[in-house]
Image: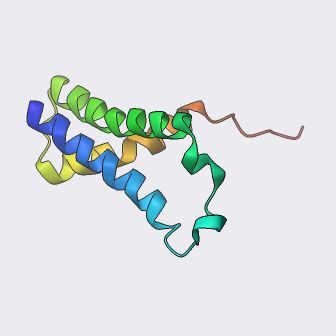
Amino acid sequence: MQEAFWYGILGGFLAELFGLWKLRHELGSNLPPYLRSWFYWFMTLLMIGSGGLVAFVYVKSGISLSPLLAVNVGASAPLIIGSLTAAPPKVNP
């Protein structure tokens, strides 16, 4: 159970790392200003932690996770949370 948590943390870390990896061709002056924000880094740590938490909840629910699946669950946690907090699409009558 604890192992799934740490694999989920790894998945969350890899997902966040990929977001930063996309900025690799930017020069220092062209980097987004939010990278200097403590709030951004705090939220990044929370999202990484959410990967471990979601993997832990899966295992606690009786679902067996292999290490690879736990990493995938951890990486998808920010996407799941983002979709839950997104506004519903507007429908034109």
> In the rendered image of this protein, does residue 30 appear above or below residue 16?
below
Q: In screen coordinates, is 41 left or right of 49?
A: right
Q: In screen coordinates, is 79 left or right of 35?
A: left
Q: Position of residue 4 (x, y in %)?
A: 15, 38
Residue at the bottom extreme? Answer: 25
| Image quadrant in which you'd find residue 62 | top left
Q: Position of residue 55 (x, y in %)?
A: 24, 35
Q: Quadrant of the C terminus?
A: top right
Who's the residue at 55% across and 50% down the image?
35
| Image quadrant in which you'd find residue 30 | bottom right
Nearer to the camera, 85 or 22: 22
Q: In screen coordinates, is 17 left or right of 85?
A: left
* Res. 93 in view: yes
Who's the residue at 44% across and 41% down the image?
78
Who's the residue at 32% across and 34% down the image?
49
Q: Position of residue 10 (x, y in %)?
A: 24, 48
> In the rendered image of this protein, does residue 67 appear above or below residue 60?
below
Who's the residue at 39% across and 37% down the image?
45
Nearer to the camera, 38 or 8: 38
Residue at the right extreme? Answer: 93
